[in-house]
Image (cartoon, grey):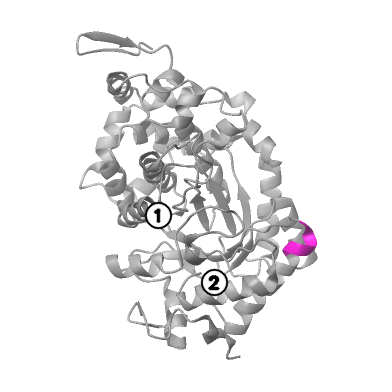
Amino acid sequence: MLLRTKLFGQTYEFPDLRVLMGKANEEKSGDRLAGVAAETTAERAAARFVLAEVPLSALRANPAVPYDQDEVTRVVDDAVNETIYGEIKGWTVGELREWLLADTTTSEMIRRISGGLTAEMIAAVTKLMSNLDLIYAANKMRVTAHCANTIGQAGTLSSRLQPNHPTDSPEGIRASLYEGLAYGAGDSVIGINPADDSYGSVARLLEMTYGVIRTWEIPTQNCVLAHVTTQMKCLQAGAPVGLVFQSLCGSQQGNDSFGISVGLLDEAYALAKKYCVPAGPNYMYFETGQGSALSAGAHHGWDQLTLEARNYGLARRYSPFQVNTVVGFIGPEYLADARQIQRAGLEDHFMGKLAGVPMGCDACYTNHARADQNAIENLAVLLTAAGCNYFMAVPMGDDAMLSYQCTSYHDTPTLRQLFKLRPAPEFEAWLEGLGLMRAGVLTAQAGDPTFFLQR
């Protein structure tokens, strides 16, 4: 395949799709670190001109890692609906972009076509999108899921209540949990990142959070974000698990570094369907983020956006309740500043939705990145306009255990009011019954954690 164009009197030629895909990316410090970034704006534009003419069939034929060498590639390729693929394999990447943005293209049409797409196709079309394109196209796509409640419906915006504690103190977590509930947070999940990954500690936190859910009859689910093997022990021992969590990487080598495999995830999924407390049928929770494969030396020479798209192809196998890009958490080596973090958040949300998974975003940054709280609030506004399913809810937007900056308990209620959105319907009814919400707006009683000390 000849990958060449002439622009402004200069000829640009790219030796293969790997190089072309890297050069077509928006500027990312991680791609620069990996040696795959465009050297100039003109080279980036030239790469996009060429990429727009590449047929989708060529991208399926040239995955980031060969089929016989990588189980993530096999999961993604084996899941392709061959009938749908046959209808679109002759499209170019540019034609796919135009189809996605057309006024006549509906959410249902996109959901069907996604069954014929591989991760590399999704990554390629993302590279041709402006930020506004990513917002507009993602807003068309509604991906819902149900565990104890329903996430992702039109007109809703949910939040993960994240009451982390540096020592996993049940009392400290419970106090933070009550404050978050008082702000109407927690309809996607009550999810704790444990400082201690041991079975005993994780089981204790599961029991505590489920006790709060049961006492107050909260229509939500709990999760302790330990390694999946620890959660599997908890399931087998009868601990009350709502969602089963695991971080993903876009290559088999990267997942090896996480201590997971497709076979292990298959086993965890089977246990979740057998032992999780809620009705389901969606029980899995995955987190991703651009740069994870590169940080593990497992990117196989490809750009970080393409490896991120492969995460969503893997996640789709398990019909997850939610998938979350922790977009600014991995650090400035991969996303250097607010502009790069914002771009990556919009890319990841769009790619996940196009892959057919329910997407949220941890709009966040670490303190050594060139970003601030205003930048993260900007990203949250953009993603809300794009139809993001949920955000994090952290006390004061400052995670005391993970030491990073994030969205706060009151940010999601503010975004709901700004965009005229509501919590998950079951959760809103619960808030209304307690007197914490009326007509989708928090009442004067909201925000006071002592409300939950009355029983």
The span from disc 1 to disc 2 (Cα, nearest Å) is: 28 Å
Viewport quadrant of the C terminus: bottom right
Q: Nearer the viewer, residue 369 or 234?
A: 369
Foreground mark, 1 or 2?
A: 1
Q: Is residue 398 above or below residue 375?
A: below
Residue 220, which numbered label?
2
Instruction: Indicate the amino acid at tag 1.
Output: Gln
| Marked residue nearer the N-terminal end (1 or 2) | 2
Question: What's the residue at 57%, 53% (across, down)?
Answer: 403
Say if the magenta span includes residue 199.
yes
Question: What's the residue at 46%, 64% (across, down)?
Answer: 159
Q: Nearer the viewer, residue 194 or 420?
A: 194
Say if the magenta span includes residue 81.
no
Residue 373, which numbered label?
1
Q: Which residues are magenta?
A: 198-202
Locate residue 107, reporting x and y percent. 32, 52
Q: Answer few, some or many: residues within 10 Å of disc 2's Cα (few below 14, many 20 plus, some between 14 and 19).
A: many
Residue 85 seen by the camera = no
